[in-house]
Amino acid sequence: MFRIYCIISILLLSFSVQSQILTKKRSHFSKTDSLRGSLRAERTSYEVKKYDLKVKVEPEKKYISGVNSMNFIVKENTNRIQVDLFENMKLDSVVYQENHLDFERQYHAIFINFKSELKASDQTQNIKLYFSGYPIVAKRAPWDGGFVFDKDKNGNHFIATAVQGIGASLWFPNKDHPADEPDEVTVTIINPSDLIGVSNGRLTNTEKLKDGFTAYTWEVKNPINNYNISVNIADYAHFSDQFNDLDLDYYVLSYNLEKAKKQFQQVKPMLVCFEEKFGAYAFYEDGYKLIETPYLGMEHQSAVAYGNGYKNGYLGRDLSNTGVGLKWDFIIIHESAHEWFGNSISSSDIADMWIHESFTTYAESVYVECQFGYDDAVKYLNGLRPLIANDAPIQGVYGVHNEGSSDMYYKGANMLHTIRSVVNNDELWWETLKEFHLNFQYQTIDKNQVIEFFNEKLNLNLTPVFEHYLSLAEIPTLEYRITKNNELLLRWKSPITDFQMPIDYFIKSEKHRTMISSDQWTNTNLKVRKNKDLNFDTTSFYIKTKRVSQ
C-alpha cells in the first residue's frame, strides 16, 4: 500500500528486455542498496523460523527498547550472518548460547561473527538481538515510513508503525529481506497501562507490570512479511464478530465505537467476495482484525490498519471520478485484499512489489463486480486510468531493494483486466485466480513464477503481454490502416519479441475479434468504409490506438 499514497497525494492536491526500452528505470545503486537488497552468503546461509519480539514503547520520550529472540536453521556452513537495523538505532548486544558475540556495522547492515563455524542442520538455533533507540518518526505516514507518535482528541497517546517500503529494520533487528519470512512470530508490546497494545495474530497474554506498564503478547501462527509486523497503541475499545469460523476483532478509538460498528459491516461481504473469487482467507488461525491508526491504512497481516475516517471512498473521495468509488470504503477493501496478495502470496524481491499491488488494486474492481455488477467494475477500472503516468516500468531492479513505478497499482490492475479480456472465458479466469492464490499461499514468489503459472493454467503464451506491461513504460499501441480498397489492417507496436494479443472491435454494430502480432500487418479481410464506423474496445483492453496512413 505504501506507494499508492504518494500517487494520490500528488494527483489530488528478470525477463531481460533491451536496456534502452526500460524507460526511466534507475541504473545506479549504492552500497547501502546492495546490502539491503541482495542475497549474499551472509543471508542465504540461514533461514529464519521464528521471531519472539519484545518491545517497550515509552511514548513521552518516543523511545523504544527490547529484544528479538530469533530462531533459525543453518542452510550452509557459516561463521558470519547478516541482520539489519537502521543506523540511528543501537544494537546493544548479541547473545548466542549465553555468550556475547562480536558484530560490525555497514550502514543499516550488521554482520555477526560466531566464535566457531555453524554447521548446516535442521536443528533450530537461537540468537538474541538486544536493541534500543529513538526510531525514525514518520512525518507524513504512510507517505513516509516510521513510528507515528500522535494524540487522539482526548489527549491520549495514539501510536502505530508504518514501514512498508522502508522496512521493519527501521525499528527492530531482523533479516530484512522479503525472500525469508518467519514461519511464526510472537510480539509482546509493553506500553503505559492506561493504553492497549495491539499487534498481529491473537492476544495470548496480558501482564500488568510494576512500573506502570502493561505487556500485551500476540502470537502469529503463519508466515508473515517483516513489514507487516506492527505495533499499535491507543485508548482502544474492542468489539468482535464472526464470519463462518473466522474471528473478526476490531480495535477502535473509544469515541469512534458506534461509527466503527456501522462502517465495519462492509467486512463480511468483502470476505464473501474474496473467498469466492480468490479462495479461503489464509489466516484463520490468526483471525482478522481492523485496527484504527493515526494514518490512513496499511495491510498488516491479520491486523489491518484503518484510518479512513469511517467514510466511503478514499477519505471521502472517489479515485475513479465515476461515483463507483463512493459505494464502499477504500481502506477496508484494498488493505484487506492484501491478505490474499501481499500477505498470503508475497514477492521474494521488492522489485516484484507489483505482485502485491497490481493484484490488490484489481481486487478492488472484483469487489465492485461482486457487489454492484460487471459494468460498474469496468467503469471503475477505466476511471482509474487518468491516474496512470506511463513514465517508467512497474517492474523494479532485482537485488538492490528497488521497487518499480507507482503505476504498479492502476496500470497493473488494468493489465490484469486486459488479460481477462484476452482469455475471454470468465469461468476459466476466476478458476485461475483462485488456483493462483491457493497454489502459492504462504510462499514468496517472483515474476517468472507468476507468468509461468498463468501460461500453463490458461494454455496461452502470455509472457510477451506481461513483459510489455511490466517492463516498459508505454502501453501497447494498436496501429491500423484502411487500404484504398477499404480493407482493415492491424498490427501491434511493441519492441517485445513475439508480442501477440487479440483485440475486440466493432464495425458499425458488429463485433469482431482478431489475433494481432507485432511483426507484420494482419489483414482482417473486413471492409471499413468510414472511419467513424470502426471502434476498438479500449474499455476491455488497456491500449492506445493509432491510425497509420498508406
Image (cartoon, rainbow, N blue to C red):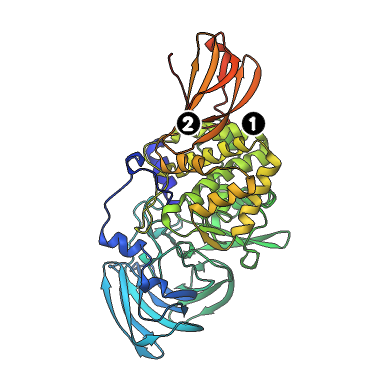
Name the residue type under label 1: Asp
Establish if 473 lies above or below 256.
Answer: above
For mark 2, what is the residue? Answer: 518
**Three-letter residue code for mark 2:** Ser
**Secondary element at tag 1:** helix
Secondary structure found at label 2: loop
The C terminus lies in quadrant: top left
Q: Quadrant of residue 83?
A: bottom left
- Residue 39 appears in view: yes
Q: Are marks 1 and 2 in contact (CB under 8 Å)?
A: no
Q: Name the spot of residue 383 as percent of width and height, x first.
A: 52, 31
Q: Position of residue 133 (x, y in %)?
A: 32, 71
Residue 96 x/y as whole percent = 39, 86
Question: Which residue is denoted by mark 1 in the rendering?
Answer: 375
Q: How many marks?
A: 2
Q: Position of residue 543 (x, y in %)?
A: 49, 30
Q: Residue at x 64, y 68 (%)?
A: 285
Q: Quadrant of residue 246?
A: bottom right
Point 51% across, 39% down: residue: 465
